[in-house]
Amino acid sequence: MVKNLIILSISGLVIALPFLFRQTSQVTGWQAGDPELVVITPHNEAIRFEFGLGFSQWHQQHYGKPVKIDWRSLGGTTEIMRYLEASFLASYRAYWQRSGKDWPAAAQRLMDSHYIPDGSSIDNLYQTFRSTDDPGIFSANIDVFFGGGEYDHSTAYKRGLTVPPWPEDQAPPGLFNQDGIEMIPRQLSGETWRTPTLFGVAVSTFGICYNKDRLRELGVDTPVRWDDLANPKLIGQVGVADPTKSGSIAKAYEMIIQQKIQQTVLAAGFTNDDITRFESAFDKAHGKPWEIPATVPVHYQQAVEDGWREGLLLIERIGANARYFTDSASKVPIDVSKGDAAMGLAIDFYGRYQAEYSRAPGGIERMVFVTPEGGSSVSSDPVSLMRGAPHKEIAVRFMQFLLSDDGQKLWNYRPGEVGGPVKYALRRLPIRRSFYPSGNAVLNQAFETHRPHLTDNLADPAINPYELGKKFTYRLRWTGHHFNIHRNLIKAMCLDAGEELKSAWQAIQQHGGTGLNSSAMQAFSALPDDFNWRSAIDGYSKANQLDTMRRWVLHFRQTFLKAKRLAEGDAS
C-alpha cells in the first residue's frame, strides 16, 4: 500500500512539473480553440518571447490562425532530459498496466541507448515503446524539444524519446537544398548539424568573456587562448558553470580537451593530414576506440592520450581559479559584465548578448567575448520532434519555421527590422548558408539582402561559422565517448573537492609558483591511478557510478591536501 502511494505521488509530481514551470504566452489575438504548441527548452526568456511571437505571426499569415506556445522551462538540458525520461516512463507504465500486463522490474532498461533485444522479458516492452507514436496511447505531453546541444538531442533519440518529423527523403522543399545548393549541411568541422531526427537551427562556438576594466586592474593581458583562464593572477576571478547542469558548458570543456589533444599530436611530429588519415583508419576499422589499426603508429595514439590528460589538467587549473561554479551558464557573462568576475567561460550567444546589453553610455563596450583561434568547433543548437506529440502537425510547422529564412532572421536581425525580433537583439548565429557571404553568386546575393539588417557582421571571419569551421575539426573518437565521464570527473575534481583544489593552488602560487614546486605540482596533477583515456570508456560505464564518484572525490581531496603540504614545505 505504502509503495503504491509513493509511486502515485511520484507520478503526480511528474505530471504537475510542466504546469509549475509553464510560461505565460505573449501572443495576442489568440482565442480558445486556436492552435497550441507545447515546447520544452533551456532557452532564455528573450528567445522564448521572440520565437513565440514570431511563429504565431508566421502561422497566422500562412494558415490563418495564431498559435499559443506553452513554454516549459525546467533549467538546463540535464534537467530537461531527466524530466522527459521520467514523464515518458510514467505514461508508458500507466498504458502498459491498463492493458493488464505486468510491469517488469527490469523496465528501467527501456531507455538504455545500448540495449539490444536478446529474448529477455522486456523485449516486447522495448519494441512496443519504440514503435508507438500516438499520444492517445502514451505521451510526455510535449511536442517539441527546442535548444540544447547535439549530444542531448542524439541521446534523446537513442533513448526513444524523439521521432523523425518527416521521411528522410521527403523534407519540405527548399528547407535543406535550394536550387541545388545545400542550405544546411549535415556536418561541419566534424560536428553534426542535422540528422533525420534532429535539426540544427542555430550554431554556436565557445570561448572566453572578459571585463576590460577588471583585467586592467589585475594586470592581465587580453585572453586569446584557453590557457589564459588558468593565469594565477586570476585566482578567485574566473566564472565557470557546473558541467553536470549545463550541456553547453560541458561542450566548452570538451573543446578545451580537443584543442589540447590536437596541440599535443602536432607537437609529436604529426600533421593535420596525418590526423585525418589516421582517424579515418580508426573509423574504417569499426573496432573499439582504443584498438589501433595496423596503419596507425602506436605513438600517435599515445599522443592523443597525453593530450587528453593535458586538457583535463588545464581544466583543473581553471577550476582552481574559479570564483564559483554556477548551475546556470548564462550567469557567467552577466557577472563578468558587472565586474563580479574578471573572466569566464561562455557560449558565444550568452557572451555577445550580454556584451550588447551591458554597453556603457555612449556605446562603450565593458565586456568582450572572444573565441580562441582554433579553440572551438561550430556546434549546432537543434530542434527535435517528441514521440507522441499531442499537436504534431503544429509541431512540424514550428520546425519548418525555425529552419526557414523567416525563422532564421530572428537570431541576428536587429529589433524593429522587418521580419526581425520585436524587442530583443538575440545575437545568435543563424545556421542557413544564405546568411553568410559566399563565392556562389546566388548565396552571396541572399547574404547581401540580409546584411543591412544584421546585428553582427556575419562576414567577419572571426564570427562566420563557415570560416571558423575551417580552423577546427572536432574528432569524435578523441572525446565523444568521454562526454558524460568528463562532466562527472570535473565535478569531482573541481566542485566536490573544490575547497582543497583552491587551497592547494593558492599555496603553490604563494611559495614560488609552479616552476619552483615540482613535487607539489606532481601531486596536484595526479589523476586517479586507474583512470586513463581507455579505462574512462571501457571501465567507467561498467562500474557503479556513485561508488566511482566517491572514490574520485576522496582521491582529489587527498592529493590536493598533499600538494598544499608539499608547497608549504611539509614533506610528511
Image (cartoon, rainbow, N blue to C red):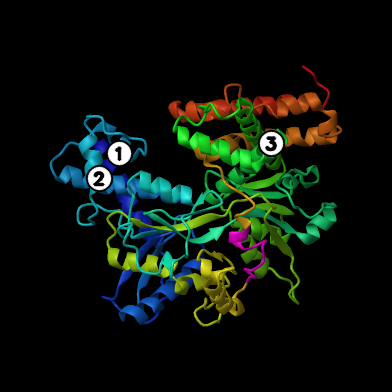
- Identify the mark at residue 129; answer none if there is no mark: 2
Mark 2 or mark 3: whose residue is earlier in sequence: 2
> How far apart are labels 2 and 1 at the CA level?
8 Å
Give the side of residue 317 with respect to residue 546, left or right.
Answer: right
* Residue at 37% from the left image edge and 60% from the top image edge: 144
| Marks 2 & 3, CB-CB < 8 Å contact | no
In the displayed structure, 278 sits above or below 215; it is above
Q: What amino acid is at disc 3? A: Thr
Q: Which residues are magenta?
A: 456-467
Check the picture and name the quadrant holding the N terminus: top left
Secondary structure, mark 1, is helix
Occupied quadrant, residue 25: bottom left
Which is in the foreground here, disc 3 or disc 1? 3
Tell me if mark 1 has few (under 14), some (14-19) or many (20+) residues whose alpha carbon lies within 10 angstroms of its own. Answer: some
Quarter occupied by the C terminus: top right
Residue wearing tag 1:
110
First-in-chain label (3 vs 1): 1
Q: Amino acid at mark 2?
A: Phe
Pointer 3: residues within 10 angstroms few (<14), some, or many (20+)?
A: many
**Amino acid type at image mark 1:** Leu
Q: Which residue is mark 3?
A: 264
Q: Position of residue 472 (x, y in %)?
A: 62, 50
Eyeballing the image, is 121 above or below 400? above
- Is residue 193 or residue 512 the one in the foreground? 193
Q: Report the Cα–Cα distance between label 2 and label 3.
A: 45 Å
Label 2 crowd bin: few (<14), some (14–19), many (20+), radius 10 Å: many
Do callouts 2 and 1 mark residues in contact (Cβ within 8 Å)?
A: yes
**SS category of the residue bearing label 3:** helix
The x, y position of residue 109, in whole percent, is 32, 35
